[in-house]
Image (cartoon, rainbow, N blue to C red):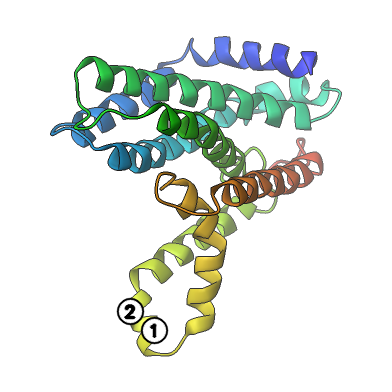
Amino acid sequence: MSRILTLAWFITKDFFRSWQSFVPLALALTFYGIAFQYGATPAYFATVTPAAMIVIAIVSVLLLAGRFNRAATFPFIARLHQRSELLLAVVLTALALTLILSGLITGMALLQHKFTTPLTGREWLLLALIWPCLFLFASFFGLLLTNLASRGSSHIIVYALVAAFAAIYDYQFELTQAHQTFLLGLWQRILDPISITLTPFTSANLVQAALLVLGYALLCFIVADWLFARKDLVWSE
């Protein structure tokens, strides 16, 4: 664990020496300026904010991993005790950055009185427990989209799967009319835990959904670690 924390600190210092470190902050401030222009209800805040932060977490992972997907860093990676340490350090850095930006957005909304109705203590507690689960999943999922943890262009397959899920969402009515209930059922079964955790104030089975989201995160890490551990750094794609 100490090696992972040390590596995360090294990654953080290296990242903030680059102009890329302004990208997550710029995205967060842009989101705040658009989403909170006319105020927000607690339900709106609990749904829209983590959705935007999920995107920022994935972008952060792509930026952090991209800085290590260079031939100059491969000797450094080869000296690691386990390659999974680098993946965990990237995720830890992205998670910390996402949580800090979430706190910044929340603090700005509170200071500028953007909430139409104040959140209760129970609602703040739910968000404090649920949001890290979503951000952790987003960070681990982001690893599968990077060139760093890709073998044989496996990240292209992940992008294609994301596009396929988006297409199913867009064509729900057409699929229902065509009696393609299997695709819709599969899509809903996979995404239900994420949908439930994005609406924590009105959803039932919230604890079960959060545990499933963490299970998704673990599965993403296992796949990313398996791909990265067997990647040939000498003849990298």
Task: From the viewer's side, name the closer residue of 149 and 46.
Answer: 46
CB within 8 Å, label 2 to label 1: yes
Task: From the viewer's side, name the closer residue of 12 and 51.
Answer: 51
Q: Position of residue 170 (x, y in %)?
A: 34, 68
Hey, which residue is sitting farthest bottom in the picture?
178
Image quarter for residue 67? top right
Please tell me how crowded label 1 is: few (under 14), some (14-19), or many (20+) other residues with Cα within 10 Å. few
Please tell me how crowded label 2 is: few (under 14), some (14-19), or many (20+) other residues with Cα within 10 Å. few
Identify residue type, mark 2: Phe
Q: Position of residue 14 (x, y in %)?
A: 56, 12
Left or right, residue 42 beside residue 218: left
Residue at 47% of width from left, 85% of height from top?
Answer: 180
Of the 4 image quadrants, the one containing the C terminus is top right
Of the 4 image quadrants, the one containing the N terminus is top right
Residue at 54% of width from left, 48% of height from top?
Answer: 206
Task: From the viewer's side, name the closer residue of 58 and 206.
Answer: 206
Image quarter for residue 177? bottom left
In the image, which disc is placed on residue 233? none
Q: Position of residue 144 (x, y in %)?
A: 61, 46
In the image, which disc is placed on residue 173? 2
Mark 2 lies on a secondary structure that is helix
> Is 71 located above or below residue 237 in the figure?
above
Identify residue type, mark 1: Thr
Residue with the mark numbered 1? 176
Hey, which residue is sitting farthest right in the picture?
81
> Is 6 located above or below residue 173 in the figure?
above
Q: Position of residue 57 (x, y in %)?
A: 48, 33
Find the distance from the CA under tag 2 to the CA under tag 1: 5 Å
Residue at 45% of width from left, 52% of height from top?
Answer: 203
